[in-house]
Amino acid sequence: MAFNYISAAEAASLIKHGYNLGLSGFTPAGTPKAVTAELAKIAEAEHAKGNPFQIGILTGASTGDSCDGVLTRAKAIRYRAPYTTNSDFRKAVNNGEIAYNDIHLSQMAQEVRYGFMGKVNIAIVEACEVTPDGKIYLTAAGGISPTVCRLADQIIVELNSAHPKSAMGLHDVYEPLDPPYRREIPIYKPSDRIGKPYIQVDPKKIVGIVETNWLDEARAFTEADPVTDQIGQNVADFLAADMKRGIIPSTFLPLQSGVGNIANAVLGALGRDKTIPAFEMYTEVLQNSVISLIRAGRVKFASTCSLTLTNDCLQDIYDNMDFYRDKVVLRPSEISNNPEVVRRLGIISINTAIEVDLYGNVNSTHISGTKMMNGIGGSGDFTRNAYISIFTCPSIAKEGKISSIVPMVSHHDHSEHSVNIVITEQGVADLRGKSPKERAQAIIENCAHPDYKNILWDYLKLTDGKSQTPHAIQAALGMHAELARSGSMKNVDWASFDK
């Protein structure tokens, strides 16, 4: 079939007010860029005429500024799910301007299939190749592309030459059956391939191909510092000790790691610790640090949803596909994050918290309980089902004005029932096999900053001490209230709270 090659502006003109768009990508990797940038111009022009123009966005995770950013600034987004990292989008969400639905990433594709989010009118997917018989070869991420391509009435392909055809074969595209006929997902080790290297669609649905040459809008994360380095070392030391005492098999277990400078510090420390054997990863995102470990032979294989890399690092993969092809696979997000597979493989999950309370409950999404940061991402998918679930964070923030260890989290993403280990630069709190009171003692003694230890002990004195989970309800959010009042949690006065 001969495809219709059109401009990004022509493609954007096919999108109407009220449409739901299904987008490829997961993080800025693999996301469409040219059509959404032109769509923002259409929205601005329609608004200038006094006409409404807003769309819904359904995607794998975050996107780049050429999608979330420009469309937010053009006030073109009515609804969006799931995860995001764009600062303009975040401001609009927290100002109540966008209906944002924060969803576990493993559930996004199936909730779209189940019809929970309405019709997918148009899918826009970035590809390195598309064949006349409807085979779409994705670029640097899997996301929810198979599902939105199947469900959409029409498909627009951004054929991006910045991703060479050598990328063909990186992907393992597999879409599970829906209930009541769902079968097991036959992944038994991270390197198993169970699908196809492309998305197969009816070529008649492809209404246009937009040729682009647009690099991924890669993010460079903050360099490691003494605090993140110490957190990383604490994680490595803990895992090495658990392996030495037989909790972790001597062959080690696959790792999942979140995104950011703490994750990079953790992986760096694990890579340096030669008591830990070369290991595999079954995760949702690969950063530069993992590619360095693959190069060094410290990571044997990495299964992921996204290559969230700097462009020079991504180019290194494309230039050396003979080396990487049997060491990396890209999957759709409902497979990379699938709870069934996570539980089966015995994955060790390592994610980042905003705050942790005395009993091990974790807030990973909201600042002071109300302001969205980025979203829950895939942390819940892995945490709930991990062999060992670990949360890391610095013990303090904002030059010590905020304690990351608090009496009660101001927003609840991960419950004490799912969190095994809490690690800060101060130390490690092992919560396994402990009662709530024992968890509180371990967290305060090992993870709280010295400036806040006595404050947290004094909070516990407000409780009756007899409850299974002691709380002084009238004071449980007292540190947050003091932060809002004076700008520092250190100023909390527990005497002002009546028992």
Image (spheres, rainbow, N blue to C red):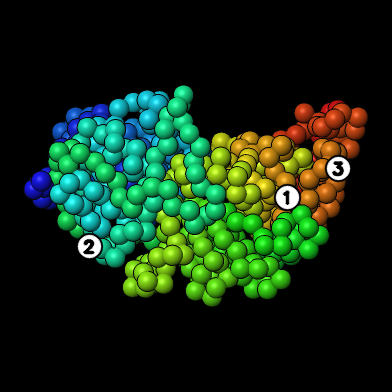
Please state the horizontal and vertical placement of residue 183, each as a whole percent of the image.
Answer: 48, 34
Q: Residue type at mark 3? A: Glu
Name the residue that disc number 1 marks.
Answer: 421
| Circle 2 residue | 161
Gap in angstroms between the C-alphas marked 2 and 1 = 44 Å
| Residue 455 position within the rendered picture, expressed as x and y whole percent measured from the top left | 82, 46
| Kind of residue indicated by mark 2 | Ser
Residue picked out by circle 3: 438
Instruction: Residue 458 in the image: state x and y as whole percent.
Output: 86, 42
**Alpha carbons under labels 3 and 2: distance apart:** 57 Å
Question: Quick check: 299 above or below 157?
Answer: below
Task: Please determine whether, in this image, residue 354 is positioned above or below residue 322.
Answer: above
Disc 1 versus disc 3: distance between alpha carbons?
13 Å
- Under circle 2, the secondary element is loop
Please report the residue visible at 71 percent of the width from the left and 58 percent of the height from the top: 249
Please indicate whether residue 6 sits to the left or right of residue 349 in the image. Answer: left
N-term mark: 1 or 3: 1
Q: Pinpoint residue 71: horizontal percent, then vertical percent.
A: 30, 43
